[in-house]
Amino acid sequence: MRSVVASSILLLMVLLLAGCATLSSDSSADAHKAARTNTQLGLAYMRQGRFEQALDRLTKAVKQDPGYAEAHSVLAILYHRLGQMDDAERHYRRSVILAPDDSAMLNNYGQFLCERGKLDEAERHLRRAAENPLYPTPEVPLSNAGVCLLRAGRSAEAESYFLEALRHNPNFARALFFMAQLRHEAGHALSARGFYQRYLAQASQTPESLWLGIQIERELGDMDAVASYSLQLKNRFPDSEQARWLIESEERRHE
C-alpha cells in the first residue's frame, strides 16, 4: 500500500513539474511576443517623431524580454536621438552582447562609438559587421569606418576602407563621393573626376556634391562644367552653406 501511495505521490509531482515547465515555456513565449510587438510599435512611433510614446513602448519591451537584442538596439537608437548618450551606449552594448553576429547592430554601435570619439573600438565593431559572410551589404560598415577615420584626420586609412567598400559594391555612392573628395584633396583631379562621375551615375546632387564638382572642374579648367554646377547650386540650394562659399569665391575671383 505504501508503495502504491509513494508511486502516486511521485507521479503527481512529475505531472506538476511538467505542468510548471509548460506554463513557464508558454509565459516566456508570450513575453517575447509582447516584447516584439512593443518594439515594432516603438520603432513606428520613433519614425513618426513621437518619441515619448516610443520610449514607453521600448522600455516595456526590454522589461518584458531582457534578452531580446532588437529591443535594446532600437531603444539605444532612440536614446541616441534624444541625446541621452550613457543610456544609449548601455543598450547598444547590450544588443551586441546578445546578438554578437548581427551586423546591423554592430554597425549601429560602431557609428555611435565613432561619434563619441572611441575610434579603435568603433573600427573594431564596424570591421566585425563587414566580415560577417552572411551580411548582404558589407560596403555600409566599411564606408562608415572610412568616414569615422576621415573625421579623425586618418585619410590614408579611410581611403583603404572606401576602396574595400567599392570592391564589394562598385556603385556604392557614399564611398564614391568620399573617394572623389580624397583624390581631389590629394591633388589628383582627373582621378577625382572619375570617382565623381561614377557617383553622379548613382545619386542625386546635393549641396556637398555640387561644391565638390565645382572645385574639381575649376582645377581641371572645365569652366562650362563649373558654370553648370554653380547654377544648380545657386538655384536648387540657395540657402546652403556651399552656395555661400560659392558666392564668396566668385567675389574673390573678380576682385
Image (cartoon, rainbow, N blue to C red):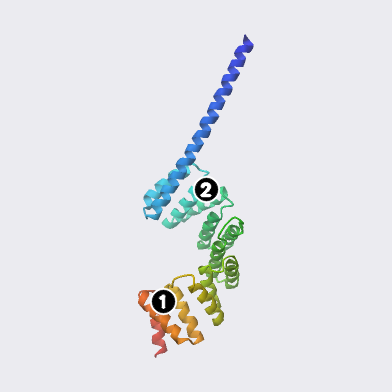
What's under tag 2, amino acid-wise?
Ala
Crowd rating for badge 2 (residues with CA inside 10 Å; few <14, some 14–19, many 20+): many
Judging by the rendered image, the residue that carries numbered circle 1 is 242
The secondary element bearing badge 2 is classed as helix
Residue receiving disc 2: 69
- How many numbered callouts? 2
Residue 143 horizontal side relative to residue 44, left or right: right
The residue under the point 45% across, 83% down is 225
Hey, which residue is sitting farthest top in the picture? 1
Residue lying at the far bottom of the rendered structure: 255
Does the residue at mark 1 contact the one at mark 2 (Cβ under 8 Å)? no
Above or below, 65 against 234 in this view is: above
Spatial separation of the CA atoms under disc 1 and disc 2: 41 Å
How dense is the environment of label 1, judged by Cα within 10 Å: few (below 14), some, or many (20 and up)?
Answer: many
The spot of residue 192 in percent (x, y) is 54, 78
Q: Where in the figure is residue 201, as x and y percent of width and height?
A: 49, 72
Residue that protrudes farthest toward the front in the picture: 201
